[in-house]
Image (tube, rainbow, N blue to C red):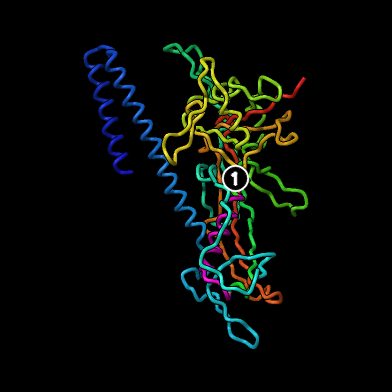
Amino acid sequence: MKEKIEKRSALIKELEEMNAKADSEKRAFTDEEKKLFDEKSAEVRKLTDEIKFEEQRASTMKEFSEISKPAEGKEDRSADASFLKVEKRAGSVELRTADMTMADGGAAIAPEQFVNDIIRAVEKEALVYPRVRKIPVSGAGSLGLPYEAADASDADWTAEVPSSEISADNTWKFGKRSLSPADLTKLIKVSKKLLATSAVSIDALAKEKISQKLIAAFENAIINGTGVAAANSGNVTQPLGLFTASADGVSTARDVETGTALTISADDIINMYMNLRPAYRRKAVWIMNSDILKQVMLLKDKNDQYLWHESLRVGEPSTLMGLPVLESEYAPGGSGTGGALAAGDYVMVLGDLDHYQFAYWKGMDITVANEVFAGKNQVGFYGHTLADGMPTLAEAFTRLKIKAGS
């Protein structure tokens, strides 16, 4: 990444020199200079996107590492392969670090030795969570987020000596939104027999699996969270998602309705794009699921050109109207029969994820319960953290809503 930063700095310096030369000669760019300027500018933007992507990736991996660490004050036993050993008593089993493969809540599949590899399904990828703005907190207390509730009015032209006192602006106002991290937990149980006959490091695998499931819950909540307590949840709240219409997050005022009933068109994509101010548009990303993306990939503009452009570089997202597309398995699709579009469906979000704030408890607590499930010859692994999140600036986002049929 260092080489890219140095190359970008050199290009910016060249652009400044080109601009300074034209200014000093009091002339506009020649056609050749304009072409060269545009080419260098495009290269700067491309390098900036690549640098940002690599920085986000490094930050995400560091954060994943942090969230897997035991909470402050808890004993870190991950480096000690003997932490699962229990005191030998009559009829007890000495556990050694081993595999977490399980069936039916941890019952051993068969009394056989396991190889030190596990065949696992691919986890759903967290694409949105790494891009939102994250705030580590030290406990479960509420975190206040001040925001600009109303903008100030524009400045007024006045006489050199006004005939009356200049009036003060009374429209600029601030409000406060609150994030209150709520408990998020995961319990995994494993049979003692399986632990005793396996060959894979159980502490590393337990941390990996529990971390994946907690981050999956983060991702799903950022996209679909209701922001309120679910029925029969004991008044437990959850983050407020981007696809959820709410005055506290992205309100219905930010919706763009499709021009044609039960159909997504190229005009709808353009209307969403233009519904964001240029400052938000520069860093915005599209969020949609695979079924919706399949429809979008077929859309063309008035010149019969596809709006969708496949990425030519590994690791970089494809683009729609020049903006990155995050194909998320958590994003909603059509709610009709067989996933068909239905009136009122929210199927796509475009926005600057810097304006989604996510507060999480710094660190993740993993507790090994040797005795609690002893009556069933099992060992439990509890994963626990606290988190909350919400969109904090509605105008930084826009949503596509499916129009009802006549």
Q: Residues within 10 Å of mark 1 (few under 14, many from 20)?
A: many
Question: For numbered disc 1, what is the local secondary structure?
Answer: strand
181 sits to left or right of 83: right
Residue 170 visible in the picture = no
Q: Quadrant of residue 252?
A: top right
Position of residue 11 relative to residue 271, above or below, is below
- The answer to which of 323 and 382 lies nearer the viewer is 323
Position of residue 319 relative to residue 362, above or below, is above
Q: How many marks?
A: 1
- The answer to which of 160 and 361 lies nearer the viewer is 361
Q: Quadrant of residue 336?
A: top right
- The answer to which of 144 and 185 lies nearer the viewer is 185
- Write down the residue under mark 1: 389
In the image, residue 33 lies at what x, y percent?
27, 17
In the image, residue 216 lies at what x, y percent?
59, 50
Question: Could you tell me what secondary structure mostly forms the magenta stretch?
Answer: helix
282 sits to left or right of 123: left
Residue at 56%, 70% (x, y): give it.
114
Residue at 49%, 73% (x, y): give it.
81
Say if the magenta span includes residue 207.
yes
Farthest residue, direction bottom: 90
Name the amino acid type tagged 1.
Answer: Gly
Q: Which residues are magenta?
A: 196-217
